[in-house]
Image (spheres, grey):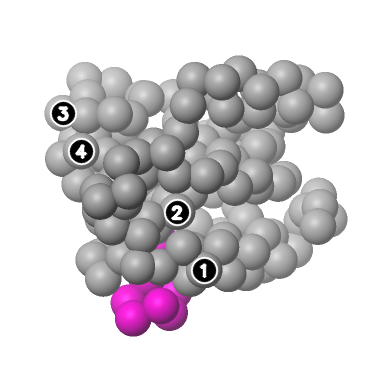
Amino acid sequence: MQIVLDPALQARIFEQMEASYPNEGGGFLLGVQTGDAVQVRDIIQINNVFAAEEQYHRYAMTPQDWARLEDQADERGLSLVGYYHSHPDSPAIPSVYDRDHALPNFVYIITSVQSANAVDMRVWHLQPDRAQFAADTLVVQESGGAQA
């Protein structure tokens, strides 16, 4: 699968994930999917509600966040196409926890943040059998659809 992300949105993700350091941060990807391509049109950061002492390696949001964002996406003619989060001082590779809590129809953008600096961004999707993630292709290019 090919994931297209505007450079301005990539920069916003990097800024948010660096600001969340040393804890994990994250949010939703809003966009459109056509065949094997996903165009990310916007991102919306969601506060980490995991227990404070676990936020350095865990990220969670509430079901109310999910419902609210689905409504916002619908109002804008978009869909929730995925989720982004950081891995502080760890590689941008899905963990077992990520796999256990992922959805097969979502795109996952993971940003590695080392010493408060975003150093790597990779995209993934969960295989339908839920056994593992597969790497996707990230294309960072101007889309004209990004919103500040």
Does residue 80 lie above or below 98 as drawn? above
Residue 103: image quadrant is: top left
Tags 2 and 1 touching, CB below 8 Å: yes
Task: State the residue in front, 143 or 118.
Answer: 118
Q: Determine if the magenta segment contains residue 117.
A: yes
Q: Earlier in the sequence, mark 3 or mark 2?
A: 2
Q: CA distance from mark 4 to mark 3?
A: 12 Å
Nearer to us of marks 3 and 1 is: 1
- Where disc 1 sits, the SS reads helix
Residue wearing tag 2? 25
Circle on res. 19? 1
Nearer to us of marks 4 and 2 is: 2
Kind of residue at disc 2: Gly
Q: CA distance from mark 3 to mark 2?
A: 25 Å
Which secondary structure type mostly characterizes the magenta part of the structure? strand
Q: CA distance from mark 3 to mark 1?
A: 32 Å
Does residue 82 lie above or below 22 as drawn? above
Residue at x 71% of width, y 66% of height:
8
Tags 1 and 4 touching, CB below 8 Å: no
Q: CA distance from mark 4 to mark 2?
A: 15 Å
Residue at x 35% of width, y 68% of height:
22
- Where disc 2 sits, the SS reads loop
Residue wearing tag 3? 131
- Where disc 3 sits, the SS reads loop
- Magenta stretch? 111-121
Tags 3 and 2 touching, CB below 8 Å: no
Q: CA distance from mark 2 to mark 1?
A: 8 Å
Query: From the viewer's perspective, is 21 left or right of 32?
Result: left
Task: State the residue in front, 145 or 102.
Answer: 102
Kind of residue at disc 4: Tyr
Sort mark 4 into few (<14), some (14-19) or many (20+) by Cα contacts within 10 Å.
few
Residue wearing tag 4? 97
